[in-house]
Image (cartoon, grey):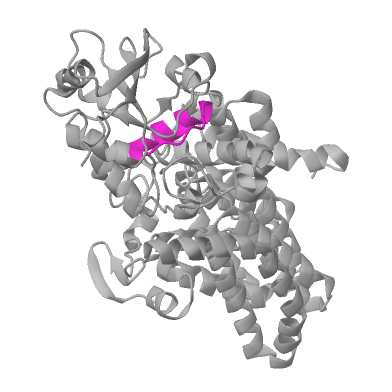
Amino acid sequence: MIPGRRGRAVPWALYALVVLASFYPESLHPARMILYVGDPLESAYLMAWHAHQVLRDPLHLFDANYLYPVKAAVATTEHHLLQGLSLAPLTWLTGNPILVFNCAVALTGLLDAFAARKLALALGGGDVGSWAAGALSAFNTYNVHEAPRVHIMLHAFLALALLELLVLVRREEPGRAWRLAGWLLLAGLTANYHLLYGGVLLGMVLAATALVDPARAARTLGRLVLPLAAAALLFLPVTVVYYRMAKSQGFHRELPEGVDLGHYVSTAPGNLLYGAIGPQVQRQQKGPHFVGFAALALAAIGVAGSRRRDGSGLLPARLWSPAAALLAGVFVLLSLGRDIVAFGHRLGPGPYRLLYSFVPGFQYLRIPERFGLLAMLFVALLVAQGLTVLEAARLPVVAVVLAALVPIEHLSIATLATSVPVGEDVPPVYRWLATQPVHALAEVPTYGEHSFRRETWEMYYSTYHFKPIVHGYTAYPTRESVRLRECALGVPEEQALDCLESWRVDTLIVHYPPPGTSLRQNPALEELVGLPPHSFYRGIAAREADGSLQRLASFEGPRSRIPGGRDVAFRIVRPAAPGP
């Protein structure tokens, strides 16, 4: 152990190295690189929106410019409030949403590591073991997989809330109740998932306490009532916005599928040590949940070794280690969703059904497998215990080597990466839009209902003008957005233009490919714009010729939406209805 300030800096320096390795190549190109089109652009947009709106109209942070004409459009997805507001100064300083997003990912990894390490130290873990716990909790395969959804990746506040609850139960210090409520509030301002997951986690710990010492559990609950009520009151404005949106749109989820148990041995496709093993994984749902062979072995050592030692931590290791193993198992089962499925074989109904049926809020969540993040937190604590047992057995070198192996097992090279235009490379049409009177706009050719994840391009580019746009990717498509997407898909048909005009969409941006290039024969260009119907551009020319579309501006060259193509802005001018 290195004493003094230098010693305190060593864990953070090592975590920083793991950040660089875990998020390569984005970590080396943070100003313009993301993993793929979709969730990263949505996160970048939402953080940029909050930074923009907090200066313009802070009481209406949810009234975003996408999914026109929906009010409080942010309430159709996760809000990203904490990330957007805390990093707003960086947004104002750089004007680069991609850089801000990648900084959020890096800081989130460090926060997750800090929280898990702090919890492990409090439970009696040694320096080496606690460092490994932080590394595993923050940089395990599934948490890195969730980095495009940075709000989900940030689960540090749940670990800190758990620590405060354990101290409150053990020492009965009333001030800890207020700290717990504060961490839980921050978890809610990070992601709605974490607010609900935090309630389940803390509720389980309190229930376990009640089984052992009912009087102590009752006193703890009594001390929590007022702080939790205060936190709920502070979170009430967010709750009200989501409640109104859900009721007005009829939002609801069917009992969702989770992840196959086999995915807990699935690595990311670019895993450096093992390559791709286990069942096939996807970008979002049914992702890789690889626990790690070293982590499993160390966790087993931690559970077995805890029987013979109490340790010097907040709780005796012989008590908390088996409880942590049990909780890890419970959260794995919850992550399986409505049914327990192992390697394609259904074994029976899953316990997630109980949460869906009896706990308010779970009827709106669609990805149960995110409970795997909490499972990995408890595996990480057991890893810390296992390494501490090895150190106590006078095997410090073995402990250090295994601690290094824990995060190395999870390192992978991204098989996909996308460079995003930023700053001066952004198509000029979007900066031009910022100077124009626009009531609402649509961009064509567009993608369609089954590919609307790519409408995050329009969301991202709108951060350079913030005019209302009909496009947008969201967890809950609204009735209005579905209808306007149909209208945009129908352009240049007269009925489609009539539809857009009836919704007061007055501006149309048309993206042209380079001369002699067919979008239908170049699938690679489909990542940039949608696939147009046959005779699309001839139809646009016909509508311009008959006066239905009035050309406002044209921008062409290498910085066009389709490089080498052309971006043309039109005013939609439909003939007035004939009089009586």
In this picture, residue 200 sits left or right of residue 443: right
Question: What quarter of the picture does the C terminus occupy?
Answer: top left
Q: Is residue 208 visible?
A: yes
Q: Which residues are magenta?
A: 453-470
| Image side of residue 316 versus residue 288, left or right | right
- The residue that appears at 57% across and 36% down in the rendered structure is 48
Q: Position of residue 295 (x, y in %)?
A: 52, 55
Quadrant (top left, top right, bottom left, bottom right) of the N terminus: top right
Q: Position of residue 220 (x, y in %)?
A: 74, 82
User: Residue 488: x, y in percent?
Assistant: 26, 36
* Image coords of residue 140 (percent x, y): 51, 49
**Quick check: is 3 in the magenta stretch?**
no
Residue farthest toward the front in the current orientation of the protein? 580
Residue sitting at 57 percent across and 53 percent down?
137
Question: How would you classify the magenta stretch by its main secondary structure?
Answer: helix
- Residue 575 vs residue 564, the one in the foreground: 575
